[in-house]
Image: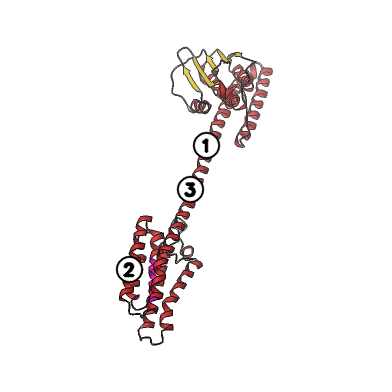
Amino acid sequence: MSPDVGTADDSAPGSVAERLRTWEWVHLGYLLFVLAQPYFTPDRDWWEWPLAISVCAVTVVLYALALLRGRTRRQIWTSIVPMAVLGALATPFNTNASVLFIYAAAAAANTLSRHVARLWFVGLTALDGVTVLVSRVPMPYRLWGFVPPLALIWIIGLLELRQRDRLEEQENERLRSSQVELLATIAERERIARDLHDLLGHSLTAVVMRAQLTKELVLADPNRACAEAEEIERNAREALAAVRSTVTGWRRTNVRAELEAARRALAGSGVTLRVAYDDKLMLVAGADHELGLALREAVTNVARHARAGVCHIGLDADEERVRLVIADDGIGGDAPEGTGLSGLRERVAKLGGAVQRTGSAGTTLTITVPIEVAA
């Protein structure tokens, strides 16, 4: 493997133990070539061993700094430039010290942009070529030390660039996956929030209104009060079961079921329900579910806010769209829409439909959905 200076990833947890992994130090084995020259030179000068040992010691320090600091641009001055300068000064006296140019190329590939790193490869190649001209090492030993780095500067450098691109792509893929998971979590939370609002808004409104009525009837009509208490219990149990199924994502409803629930809820608040329903109309499950929840929200608003005497619900279709209309003769008005109506609009919008609300004479809510997605 290449002398991989600075392959530690800054995005990873930055402990010293994680940066100084054992296999990173294996690349320092290339420094044995620096020690090989005085070892195999028969008539070596006194300074050759101290020079080789000093070059190795300084390189180890620069290498450790590179691992500790990771991929930062400070490596230009703490690793790349010092290694290149040290190699240029030592190579004329120890031809194998040109291995430092390879370390510098690897550090440049792991730290700098692709264009700048290649410029460094060119500069290090030129520097290696210049040092061969001023070297004191006799031929052919001089060439044995200089020629391999000319190729390895580019081979190792380009391999490191490729490895760096691969690691960055893996990191980008991890970030994309994390983003997708986050968006899915947010969407699921919004779905549960909408469903819980629809469920509890409807059910608790019915419970509260029937509880108030029961309190008034305890003395006046005990039998009816008992019937209302049973209805409260049934509504509470239905709400509890629906909340459980909503949290698990299994709850499904439909327009017919919500019409029956609307009849009971409005009866408890003294509102007369009139329904015009096309029995021949068959809705697909997804649209039937969403329209059912929309109907539930609209009926809850009628029972809670409208002060109406009569509520009309109509469901029909033509060649272009399915239309659900909920109209009451209550107080009307143009009050701002709350969370429920906003969630209703989001549900219908997912089907490609639209919601129109008018409040001039009572309130009329018209929900339209394209026929191709609804029936």
Q: Earlier in the sequence, mark 2 or mark 3?
A: 2
**Can residue 127 be seen in the rendering of this structure?**
yes
- Placement of the C terminus among the 4 image quadrants: top right
Q: Judging from the image, what secondary structure is the residue with disc 1 in?
A: helix
**Percent coordinates x, y for residue 45 in the rendering:** 35, 86
Residue at numbered disc 2: 127
Q: Earlier in the sequence, mark 1 or mark 3?
A: 3
Badge nearest the viewer, 1 or 2: 2
Type of the residue with mark 1: Ala
Q: Quadrant of residue 142?
A: bottom left
Tell me whether circle 1 and circle 2 mark residues in contact (CB < 8 Å): no
**Percent coordinates x, y for residue 365 in the rendering:** 51, 18
Foreground residue, 362 or 207? 362
Foreground residue, 208 or 110? 110
Type of the residue with mark 3: Leu
Q: Quadrant of residue 155?
A: bottom left
Q: Judging from the image, what secondary structure is the residue with disc 2 in?
A: helix
Foreground residue, 197 or 355? 355
Disc number for residue 175: 3
**Can residue 57 be seen in the rendering of this structure?**
no
Disc number for residue 28: none
Q: Judging from the image, what secondary structure is the residue with disc 3 in?
A: helix
**Percent coordinates x, y for residue 100 in the rendering:** 39, 70
Q: Is residue 101 magenta?
A: yes
Label 1 – label 3 distance at C-alpha: 18 Å
Quick one: which residue is furthest to the right in this view? 223
Quick one: which residue is furthest to the front in this view? 140
Residue at numbered disc 1: 187
- Local crowd size for mark 3, using a 10 Å CA cut-off: few (<14), some (14–19), many (≥20): few
Badge nearest the viewer, 1 or 3: 3
- Local crowd size for mark 1, using a 10 Å CA cut-off: few (<14), some (14–19), many (≥20): few
Q: Which residues are magenta?
A: 91-104
